Image (cartoon, grey):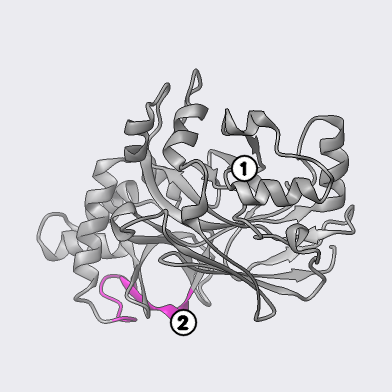
Amino acid sequence: MRLVTFYPQGSFPIVERLGALLGADAVVDLAAAYRAHLIAAGLCAPEAAARVAAAVLPGDMVLFLEAGRLGWNAAAEALQFASQAPAGEAIYEGEKPVYPRSAAQLLAPIKRPRSLRDFLSFEQHVKNARQRRGLDVPPEWYEIPVYYKGNPATIIGPDSDVAWPQYSQLLDYELEFACVLGRGGRDIGAVEAERHIAGYTIMNDFSARDVQFKEMSVGLGPAKGKDFATALGPCLVTPDELPDPYNLAMIARVNGEVWTEGNSGTIYRRFPEMIAYASNGEQLVAGDVFGSGTVGFGCGLELGKFLKVGDVVELEIEGLGILRNRVVAAQ
């Protein structure tokens, strides 16, 4: 599945809905489709069907993940039903199980993750970034999968504007991909960890570089250098849709010009190792987001050029789609 969080264009009030992409041109409202399926199959009266659908297919991705197998089974049945329903046609009480893609506004697939950990897992990026400051890669980097914790309250989605942070003069993008946990655990083994992954998405870890440099020179952080905006999207792609998540072409474009070309296969440590390390003596939960870190040459810092107001940044990863954001003036 390619799960999304969306709302129908022009709808009011705006209510977030859990959806799934149906081909390239349609978005399924999973709760509406499941309700219609339950009624059509004679399994529930309409009022009961609405309550059941809302319970197992809520509009919040984290709550859906917490429902576990019950939610996944319902989503599969809803998607199957919707594949036979015409786009844009209301079936029960004005509900539309399928919307044309142009009529659905996609949000970050997981808008309020339980936590956000961003790792530093591409060796070339580490080498490039440290060489610009006259530093070598510390030997400890090869020993442990280090990460920082971001701000889950500042997640933005596809086609959202990025407001330039007022306290910074140097804005950068970072080309990453991320995984989202579908179930939690403690002291998870690396072999077992892959089964905890609900899906993958694109991540842009926007960075205020001047502030980040100051913070990290003290020995802590990053904090304000990162916490103003992290983009995720456009969808959460389940593992069965990706034959190999570690062989994906990764591209960054700024105003249509290619700035970065990389591959996820150059990652030094894979997500199962990150999950195992983070869960050592610590409880992880469904809805935790793990960022890969930046692919080699995947940011302006490595290239010697940075973003400006008005720039449109597009990150494209094979099999995951395109994540597009525009930089706007400080607000």
Quarter of the figure with the C terminus? bottom right
Q: Is residue 106 left or right of residue 120?
A: left
* Residue that numbered label 2 is attached to: 102
Q: Secondary structure at mark 2?
A: helix
Q: Is residue 100 magenta?
A: yes
Q: Is residue 323 left or right of residue 170?
A: left
User: For the magenta stretch, what is the residue range?
Assistant: 87-104
How packed mark 2 is, by other alpha carbons closer than 10 Å (few <14, some 14-19, many 20 or more), is few
- Image point 19% across, 67% down: which residue? 81
> Is residue 47 something that shows in the picture?
no
Label count reads 2
**At label 1, which amino acid type do we have?**
Leu
How packed mark 1 is, by other alpha carbons closer than 10 Å (few <14, some 14-19, many 20 or more), is many
Rounded to the nearest angstrom, the CA distance separating label 2 from label 1 is 36 Å
Residue 120 numbered mark, or none: 1
- Give the residue furthest to the top: 281
Pick whichever, 148 or 288, lies toward us.
148
Q: Nearer the viewer, mark 2 or mark 1?
A: 1
Precedes in sequence: disc 2 or disc 1: 2
> Is residue 155 something that shows in the picture?
yes
Quarter of the figure with the N terminus? bottom left
Which corner quadrant of the image does residue 47 belong to? bottom left
Q: Whole-percent x and y of residue 232?
A: 56, 57
Q: Secondary structure at mark 1?
A: loop
Q: Whole-percent x and y of residue 249?
A: 48, 66
